[in-house]
Each structure stands twice: as C-alpha cells, then as structure tokens.
C-alpha cells in the first residue's frame, strides 16, 4: 500500500541530520516558564530570549493581563463560533474601531491569527482574472493566500521597485486588476521595504498596494503604524495587514482600509467566515496592549536603540549581520556545519535564537535570526554578544573574534 507519508522522507532525513549534528531538535524548543519578557526557562536553565518577536515586551503587560482576566470572568473563555455566526461580541467591534482609529482608516477587520489575515485578504481581493505581484521573499502566509486566490502570480526581486515596475509593464493588461503585496519589515532578514518607491510604482501602473506590517507595526513610524507611516505614504496604501502576535504580545490579525467595499469581504473571505473568532480575553488583552503601546512611545525609541546596540556588537566581533538595523537581526553563516553547532552552543551558554536553514532562507545560506525587545537591558544585550562570540569561536566561524 502506498504511504501518505512517503513524500516527507526527505525532510525526515534532513531533520535527523540536524538533530544528530547538535543533539537537539531546534524546531521544537520548549520554553518551560517565562520568567519575564526577556528571560525564560529552557532545559531547566534561565535563558536570554532573543528569538520571540516580542518587540515591545507587552506579552507581560500588567494592564493586558488584568484585562484578560476581567474579560474571561465577565464573558467566558470563548465564543464557540465564527464572526458571521455567533462569534462577534461587542469587544470584537470595539477592537476593530480602535484599530481603524489608530491607523486613521475607515474600517478594520480582525482575524483569529495574522496568518489568516494574509490568507483571507489576499485570497478574497485577488480572483482568477486578476494579477498578484509579490516580493520574492514574501512570507508563507502571502504565498498561501495567493494559492487560495487562483489569481495569476508574478514575483519580483526582493525590495526592487524597478523590477516590480518592469514586470507590471510587461503585462499589458489594463482591464485586469493588479494587487502588489510587500512587507514592511521582512521577518527573516530584518530588511525594511522601500514603501515610498513601491507607492510610486503603484500609481504609475494603476495597481493596488497591500503592505503587511506584521513586523513593523509598533516598531516603525512616529506613532508605530509601520513602514508606510515611516515613509510618509500611508494614504497611498490601499490595505494594511498585520498581526497582534509581535509588538502587542497577544494573537490575532487585522486589515485596515479606506475602501468602503472592505465590509463586503466579511461575506467573501473564507478564513474570516469559517473559523472561530478570538476569545474575549484575547480581544481585551489586545485592546489593553494597544493602549499601552500608544501610552509609551518611548518603547519604540528604546527598541531601536537596543537593535543598534546588538547589531553593532555583532559587527564588532566579526559576524555577518543584517545590512539594515531593525529589531530583526540575522547573522548569516556559510554552512549548516557551522550554523547547527553554533545554535546549540548558544543555547548551552544561555541564549535562545531562531535557527533557519535552506531552502527556507532567502539566499540559501543558514542564518541565526535574532529579535530584539525594548525590554532587553544593555547588560543582557552585551552578554548575548559575548555568548555569540564564544559560540562562533567554538563553531569555527570564519572572521569571528
């Protein structure tokens, strides 16, 4: 009998090699107990967390925790239904209004995850007679949304407005709608999108533009609205998608837009229509975390100061760090034979980061992906840099000192 699992033999073999090389499965690390936003217990040891996307440290917000407790006591722990059935409570609509006002937009839709926000918006907006034009380094949720949409997909070179323009001009299809999709900060490398240049292409070609601000929401811009705000072109972006699971420390996703037709998508967006809505305690915690973020703009300043400190530390010890300074900092290595042991050494020495291996990396080289928090102290950052130096030396990383 043919096996349903034979297709996974290759990945099983690759995973076995990774585990054999380091003694651990790096993709199933358990944080046994969060001690704070920056420290967790892993393998019984207190470990510095530099791989959690908790950019503002708000997963431990006392205001959000209290709001969640109060909402669960008042409303129960779940809705048991989708948004178009019994799954919309007043809290859901209040959060949508709050998000829309925060972005200065007409309306907002809240999804159960950030993944579903991309999956839902892209698949509902782009149909079989439309074009989807995607940055080649787009997140998996964007690619999955494109598959669900049945639109014709065209990829352009990462962060390259000129290549985007050329590819759209070659289409010569003025009667077919075109949706450009880019990200504010790219989650693997920390690269920031040139959103103003993409807006110029959008206008020149008569396209729509969707910006996924998942990793730039709460991080970039004077108010934390993301890369589009930082570039001064917010009103020229048709759709902003994002997640609550990074800077706000909860879970869920959203889309904001000034297009009045957004309301119609509530009845045409399958990942919105056919999944249970967020439970009341998550909605309440997210609302409180957003209020925290707005009340403490100094968190963004501290976050970027911390990112600059970590990046400078990596450069000083000779590591190949991301070209741009953002809260996502990737250390790129040449071989898996270096990357896997180094990741294990880091964990042994008390630092947790994310290990990314080809083919999931942008340039087919392995990398150690770090995410910085506003709540990291200077001492924690310096300690992490020193541990990186020790781990790189033990792993035989060329140039490390």
Image (spheres, helix red, strand yellow):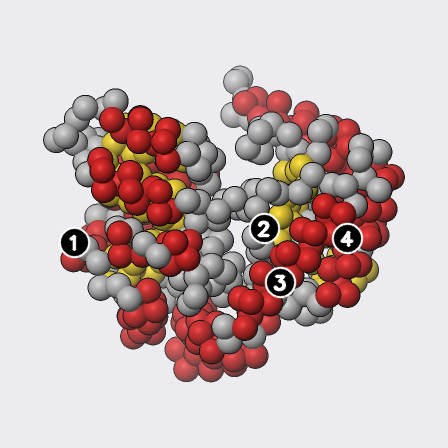
- Residue 269 in sight: yes
Using the numbered discs, state the Cα–Cα distance from disc 4 to disc 2 in whole angstroms. Answer: 16 Å
Q: Quadrant of the C terminus?
A: top right
Q: Are marks 4 and 2 in contact (CB under 8 Å)?
A: no
Looking at the image, do the residues carrying marks 1 and 4 touch, with CB atoms under 8 Å apart?
no
Q: Give the numbered dot on residue 305.
A: 3
Determine the CA span between mark 2 and mark 3: 10 Å
- Binning the other alpha carbons within 10 Å of mark 1 as few (below 14), some (14 to 19) or many (20 upward) gives few
In contact (CB < 8 Å): disc 2 and disc 3? no
Q: From the image, tell me which residue sits under label 2.
A: 325
* Image quadrant where residue 122 sits: top left
Q: Residue at x 23, y 42 (%)?
A: 203
In front of the other: label 1 or label 4?
Answer: 4
Please, which residue is most extreme toward the left here? Answer: 175
**Residue 261 tag number:** 1
Compared with 14, 316 (above or below) is below
| Residue placed most toward the observer, 138 or 147 | 138
Residue 365 x/y as whole percent: 64, 30
Which residue is found at the position 77% from the left and 65% from the top?
379
**Mark 2 falls on what kind of element?**
loop
Q: Residue at x 32, y 54 (%)?
A: 233
Name the residue carrying label 4.
385
Ranked by sequence position, the earlier of labels 1 and 3 is 1
For the residues labelled 2 and 1, the Cα–Cα distance comes to 37 Å
Determine the secondary structure under disc 1. Answer: helix
Mark 4 and mark 3 lie on one chain; the one further toward the N terminus is 3
| Sequence order check, earlier mark of 1 and 4 | 1
Viewed as shown, does residue 71 lie left or right of 35?
A: left
**How many residues crowd mark 2 within 10 Å: few (<14), some (14–19), many (20+)?**
many
- Residue 266 vs 288, above or below: the answer is above
Q: Position of residue 396 (x, y in %)?
A: 84, 33
Residue 283: image quadrant is bottom left
């Amino acid at each position: 009998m043919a096996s349903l699992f034979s297709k996974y033999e290759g990945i099983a073999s690759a995973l076995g090699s990774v585990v054999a090389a380091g003694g651990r499965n790096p993709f199933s690390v358990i944080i046994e107990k969060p001690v704070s936003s920056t420290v967790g217990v892993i393998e019984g040891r207190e470990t510095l967390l530099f791989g959690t996307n908790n950019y503002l440290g708000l997963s431990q917000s006392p205001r959000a925790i209290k709001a969640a407790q109060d909402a669960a006591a008042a409303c129960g722990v779940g809705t048991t239904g989708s948004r178009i059935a019994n799954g919309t409570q007043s809290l859901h609509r209040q959060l949508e209004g709050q998000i829309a006002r925060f972005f200065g937009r007409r309306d907002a839709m809240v999804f159960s995850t950030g993944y579903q926000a991309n999956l839902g918006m892209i698949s509902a907006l782009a149909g079989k007679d439309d074009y989807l034009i995607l940055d080649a380094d787009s997140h998996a949720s964007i690619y999955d949304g494109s598959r669900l949409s049945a639109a014709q997909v065209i990829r352009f070179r990462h962060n390259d407005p000129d290549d985007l323009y050329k590819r759209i001009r070659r289409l010569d299809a003025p009667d077919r709608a075109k949706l450009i999709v880019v990200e504010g900060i790219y989650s693997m490398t920390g690269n920031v999108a040139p959103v103003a240049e993409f807006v110029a292409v959008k206008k020149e070609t008569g396209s729509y533009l969707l910006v996924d601000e998942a990793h730039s929401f709460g991080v970039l811009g004077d108010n934390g609205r993301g890369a589009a705000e930082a570039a001064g072109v917010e009103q020229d972006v048709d759709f902003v998608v994002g997640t609550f699971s990074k800077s706000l420390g909860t879970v869920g996703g959203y889309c904001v837009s000034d297009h009045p037709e957004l309301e119609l998508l509530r009845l045409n967006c399958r990942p919105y229509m056919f999944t249970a809505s967020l439970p009341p305690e998550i909605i309440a915690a997210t609302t409180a975390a957003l209020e925290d973020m707005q009340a403490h703009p100094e968190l963004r300043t501290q976050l970027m100061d911390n990112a600059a400190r970590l990046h400078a530390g990596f450069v000083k010890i000779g590591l190949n760090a991301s070209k741009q300074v953002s809260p996502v900092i990737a250390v790129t290595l040449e071989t898996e034979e270096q990357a896997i042991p180094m990741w294990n050494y880091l964990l042994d020495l008390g630092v947790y980061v994310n290990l990314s291996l080809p083919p999931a990396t942008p340039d087919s080289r392995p990398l150690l992906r770090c995410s910085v928090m506003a709540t990291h102290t200077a001492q924690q950052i310096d300690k992490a840099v020193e541990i990186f130096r020790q781990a790189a030396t033990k792993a035989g990383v060329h140039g490390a000192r």
